[in-house]
Image: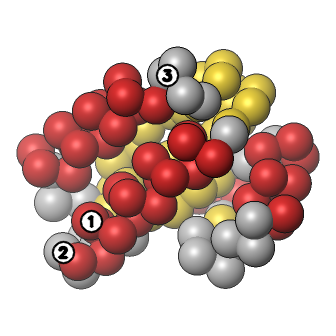
Amino acid sequence: MSEYRFCLRGDVDIETAARVRADLQALIAHDSAHLLIDCSQLDFIDSTGVAVLLEASRDLEAAGRHLVLVNVPEGPLRVFEVLALTDLFCYDRELAS
């Protein structure tokens, strides 16, 4: 199965979550590929942003597809670790090349 790359940039928080959610929902509905989310330009993510990623992951998994986060910077990665969510997402820095 193919994969589609989506880049998160800047902050994904309560102010930007609705736009990111809409973008991800459109991709999930339009394409049958796995979703690779490149976080190399992600500066910050809050619980609202995390919820958006969890929703996208749930929707993809229901369709037999996967969400893969790549190039997660240390700050956002700490958020996932504090929330004990590192096992819910696939991480693979090698896929980002």
Q: Which amino acid lies under the numbered mark 3 shown in the image of this protein? A: Thr
The picture quadrant where one finds residue 27 is: top left
**Looking at the image, is 65 positioned above or below residue 17?**
below
Q: Which amino acid lies under the numbered mark 1 shown in the image of this protein? A: Asp
Labels 1 and 2 touching (C-beta < 8 A)? yes
Q: Does the rendering let one see residue 36? A: no
The answer to whether 67 appears left or right of 14 in the picture is: left
Q: Circle 2 is placed at which residue position? A: 63
Q: Does the rendering let one see residue 76? A: yes
Color scheme of the displayed model: secondary structure
Q: How packed is label 3: few (under 14 Cα within 10 Å), some, or many (20 or more)?
A: some
Q: How packed is label 2: few (under 14 Cα within 10 Å), some, or many (20 or more)?
A: few
Q: How packed is label 1: few (under 14 Cα within 10 Å), some, or many (20 or more)?
A: some
Numbered mark located on residue 50 in the image: none
Mark 1 vs mark 3, CA separation in Å: 20 Å
**Looking at the image, is 92 positioned above or below residue 14?**
below
Give the SS element for disc 3: loop
First in residue order: circle 3 vs circle 2: 3
The answer to whether 83 appears left or right of 96 in the picture is: right
Q: Which amino acid lies under the numbered mark 2 shown in the image of this protein? A: Ala
The answer to whether 89 appears left or right of 56 in the picture is: right
x and y percent of residue 28 in the render? 21, 51
Q: Circle 1 is placed at which residue position? A: 59
